[in-house]
Image (cartoon, coloured by chain):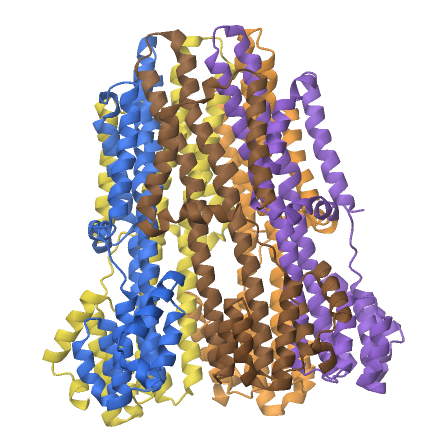
Chain colours: A orange, B purple, C brown, D blue, E yellow
Amino acid sequence: MDLATIIGILSGLGLIASSILMNGDFGIFVSVPSMMIVGGGTIAAILIAYPLKEALGVMRIGMKVFMSTKQNYMGLIQELAQIASIAKQQGVLALEAEAKKSKNPLIQQGLMMISDGFPRTTVVKILTSQITTMQNRHRAGREIFAEMGKYAPAFGMVGTLIGLVQMLAGLNDPSSIGPKMAVALITTFYGALLANLLFNPMATKLKRRSETETLEMRLIIEALLSIQDGENPKIMVDKLKVFLDRQLKAMVEKKMFKSPVPARKAA
Amino acid sequence: MDLATIIGILSGLGLIASSILMNGDFGIFVSVPSMMIVGGGTIAAILIAYPLKEALGVMRIGMKVFMSTKQNYMGLIQELAQIASIAKQQGVLALEAEAKKSKNPLIQQGLMMISDGFPRTTVVKILTSQITTMQNRHRAGREIFAEMGKYAPAFGMVGTLIGLVQMLAGLNDPSSIGPKMAVALITTFYGALLANLLFNPMATKLKRRSETETLEMRLIIEALLSIQDGENPKIMVDKLKVFLDRQLKAMVEKKMFKSPVPARKAA
Amino acid sequence: MDLATIIGILSGLGLIASSILMNGDFGIFVSVPSMMIVGGGTIAAILIAYPLKEALGVMRIGMKVFMSTKQNYMGLIQELAQIASIAKQQGVLALEAEAKKSKNPLIQQGLMMISDGFPRTTVVKILTSQITTMQNRHRAGREIFAEMGKYAPAFGMVGTLIGLVQMLAGLNDPSSIGPKMAVALITTFYGALLANLLFNPMATKLKRRSETETLEMRLIIEALLSIQDGENPKIMVDKLKVFLDRQLKAMVEKKMFKSPVPARKAA
Amino acid sequence: MDLATIIGILSGLGLIASSILMNGDFGIFVSVPSMMIVGGGTIAAILIAYPLKEALGVMRIGMKVFMSTKQNYMGLIQELAQIASIAKQQGVLALEAEAKKSKNPLIQQGLMMISDGFPRTTVVKILTSQITTMQNRHRAGREIFAEMGKYAPAFGMVGTLIGLVQMLAGLNDPSSIGPKMAVALITTFYGALLANLLFNPMATKLKRRSETETLEMRLIIEALLSIQDGENPKIMVDKLKVFLDRQLKAMVEKKMFKSPVPARKAA
Amino acid sequence: MDLATIIGILSGLGLIASSILMNGDFGIFVSVPSMMIVGGGTIAAILIAYPLKEALGVMRIGMKVFMSTKQNYMGLIQELAQIASIAKQQGVLALEAEAKKSKNPLIQQGLMMISDGFPRTTVVKILTSQITTMQNRHRAGREIFAEMGKYAPAFGMVGTLIGLVQMLAGLNDPSSIGPKMAVALITTFYGALLANLLFNPMATKLKRRSETETLEMRLIIEALLSIQDGENPKIMVDKLKVFLDRQLKAMVEKKMFKSPVPARKAA
């Protein structure tokens, strides 16, 4: 579970709810037609804008925001250092066995290609296309949320316009103006809330997720190329550390010195 | 038929209509001058902004959004693998016959150039310019919809301003204020609806269509170059799979193993 | 005459005018101070934002939107194919005479450089800088219209604010509120109309014009380099056709086969 | 003096002032608290957003918009042609004396490096970094004006909100509503006027200035490299003319033919 | 302490406060529910949008805006010139000792790699990835502030909508309209103030900080490569000066001539 997402949504809704309850009851903020216009209009626009398969995949992508993905860079670098020293000691052909042991599909694919003797440029090309393919898949999902963040307030305004027109057209009873305008404004309120408490922040988090995954894949590719070039595992680890931020770098450095990774001996 | 587009537009209009009918009748939302200003103004702006030929082509491009284009990547990869193994067995000259059999104009053109012995760089240049030309053609069409998505609300506001000025200038009968303002606001309502339920989502779908077509063309070019280079069909299929997303990749893999594609034997 | 521009502006103004006349007379929409603020303010902002020479050149650039420029790609390709076959038959030195015959300054300059024996890289550099220079000149002109499309509504709002402040400051006669607010809103109406029916669409059309001209210049440069390389005129025509869209391509193909262009024989 | 800037600001203010005076007196548009909020708030935001040195440098950069900088491309090309023919006749070492004669720091630096025998790539790198450094310096200054163009209307709205809250909180005297709202709106008016008649146009003009200076520097670098390569001065002038627009090009051509520039003889 | 930031925030708040006090007391501008919605909503959105670690790091990053970082380019160039002349006189191996003396981690890392005999391309790659890593870290922090600058006004509007709906729904007491609308508008006021006096300017300052740090790192890398290439220290200083702006350049020139830097002798 991604705790930040859960806390954010619950605390946001809680704050809005409690500030509503401070000045009155909740009932006036519930309006079925308003929900229909904002929710339904946004969904309709997304169905027109995106292929059916992608539009239906929104729920699944949205769930990702609630699930935590912990980056274990240290473990990853240790695994890669281990593989590098095995390649150094037992030759490139030994990598096929390593490929089967690894759980990361990118490491698997890369090691298979290296042990199959693919030329370096082909390895680079195929592995980096994997990053592009992944980024495109993520971008498509993220864009749907960003679009929903635009359509929700737009249909909020559409609903408010409908309410205002209906109120103004039948302006015979002055005492009904207030409540009718209140109902009209609720649609705008729904749109603003959905966009700013759900769709826009979720689009941002999906973007960060994609960046993190890109970084990890770039780190792996860097390591695989280093292995194919037969580079010293120590130099490889030095290169990989560049990808990490300061705190992680210090941790990796400490761990690497203590742990009897073959990479250190080979240096 | 692109089901998503149809469902989206019908459900969107249905939701708006039913939420209007919940609180009154439909009549007050029909205004001919408002339609004239929003529709006519948007068309006028597009006529000024784009060459006549492109502006008139909008309808035809718009129809594309309603038509479904199913990507048959598996069939495409099988066709290309077949061609690759024929080139491997019978030589490059045999490709002229294959070019005539293919229904895809890009495959035709590419095979003709390969069998004519064009140098690799020329083949790359001409084929990739085909992508650029296609993208430019699509972009031009898409941009018109995006522009209409900007002009519709703008002329909605223009119409509302006209209504407000007329109402305010003749403010002698207070009881007429409401209905007149209602009429003025309908133009803004039309503009918002057209932009958010038609023009903007259609521009997005056209963009996705272009991306899909680009991917398919890039896949074909990759395959053609692989054929020209005389690469092993198995390696070619491996390269092409990189373009596909996960689900498709699994399907291609299964199919390829079962089907007696010559590419597998040649490997 | 660019018919689309004329039709667009006339029909746009006609629609606005007729929808105004449906509900009242035209008089209330004429306000000299409002025109002064929107028109004068926009001109003032442009004078501050751009060098005097460019600001004064706006009228001349604006006229371009009303003039039609028909692309005659077929004629252009025929001319270039003719030149290519002459170069093939009579040698590069014969191009000086061809340079003088051509009416296109880019063809002239290119042929002169080729017959003068300039190295290929120099020819490429000088000719492509011509594209960049042309694009920069166009961009500068187009940007002024885009800026006017931003300043017109902004000064529309400034004028409305002035009107509102004056009305609110002297609120002793309630019956004068309506007419005064009407006058205040007219400035916003002017700004919105100028931006959406003139400045913004004109900026877009100028952009399309620039793209078309760029395409034509790139086609010419491609042909000139092909001539300098002594390529077969038939291959050259094949390369040039890539630049054209589908309809044109079919036309060029038909024409080329029928017309006794030397390029076909030389192939 | 940049006449366009002066005319623009004076005519803009004059138009606003006269359209105010047409409908009342000027007094109601003067409000010290509104000025404090818009002016002070904008300055405060800039102080937070930029290093103190840059924020204080705004006045000096702003003055540049009022000063005219006439480009003398013809003189520049003549000077460079002269230097080129001297280099051709007397050798590269003679350029040290020319460097001292020139008033342009970029020409000085370039000639010094050429006469010192710096390799071509170093000359290119150092001179083009001068362009980047200049552009960064300009961009920083220009961005401050663009930011002020955003903060001024934002603080205008803040001031109007303050006024509205104060008015609404003490709504016991209905007759005071109008004048108080008028005062509240003046802050928005100030913000809009500052942004659209000062900050935004000034940011644009600074951008154009930077582009012109970049063009001039690129022209000089092109010439210096031509000199270092020992190219014919005539070819150099041909290359430089590409940078100029049509009108200037015709002028340069005429002048060059008449004036006894050594470059013509050497050709 | 970054004086500009402090002065900016204090003067901004002071101006707003004093302009409020001119027309009434401060009490009506304090509203706990409004603070809850704007502050809480913004924090909630950030928690959803960013990983917990980054969201919590905002305070620490925000503090950086208040701390001054003085660039000492002169000292840096002197240090690098010193190192360059030592490398020239004592060979590359002497750089390990220099690496230990330096306080700058980038200089340390670079000198270690040079003395270890890493190939040039590896040195370039690792050092420039340090810039990219630093920029990404900064960008992540800066983006959070820019996002807060968008969410604060959005939740300001949400709060105002809540207030308006509550007011309009219970419109039985006309005299309560004013005060209730005042309270509703305060939320918008809070949002606008937070965005324009805190979040947006802070995001800009963080961006400038990042640019300055990038410049410094690029200067160091330029110097280290010059050292690795065994370039003359004088030429190195010439190259480095290009990075500085005019004022600094004059200062460096003067200092360098007076100070007995070995680089001058070696020239």
Q: Quadrant of the C terminus of chain E?
A: bottom left
Position in image of residue C21 (x %, y %): 56, 19
Position in image of residue C226 (x %, y %): 60, 78
**Residue C143 in view here:** yes
Q: Quadrant of the N terminus of chain E?
A: bottom left
Q: Residue at x 72, y 50 (%)?
A: A51
Name the residue nearer the viewer: B202 or B7: B202
Q: Residue furthest left?
A: E258
Identify whether D23 is placed above or below D47.
above
Q: Residue furthest right?
A: B260
Left or right of A266? Residue E81 is left
Left or right of A237? Residue D128 is left
Identify whether D30 is placed above or below B230.
above
Left or right of B86? Residue E10 is left
Q: Residue at x 46, y 18 (%)?
A: C28
Tag count in the figure?
0
Q: Quadrant of residue C88?
A: bottom right
Position in image of residue E134 (x %, y %): 39, 65
**Residue E27 in view here:** no
Name the residue nearer the viewer: B256 or B126: B126
Q: Quadrant of residue A238?
A: bottom left
Left or right of C216? Residue E94 is left
Position in image of residue B168 (x %, y %): 47, 15
Name the residue nearer the viewer: A147 or B190: B190
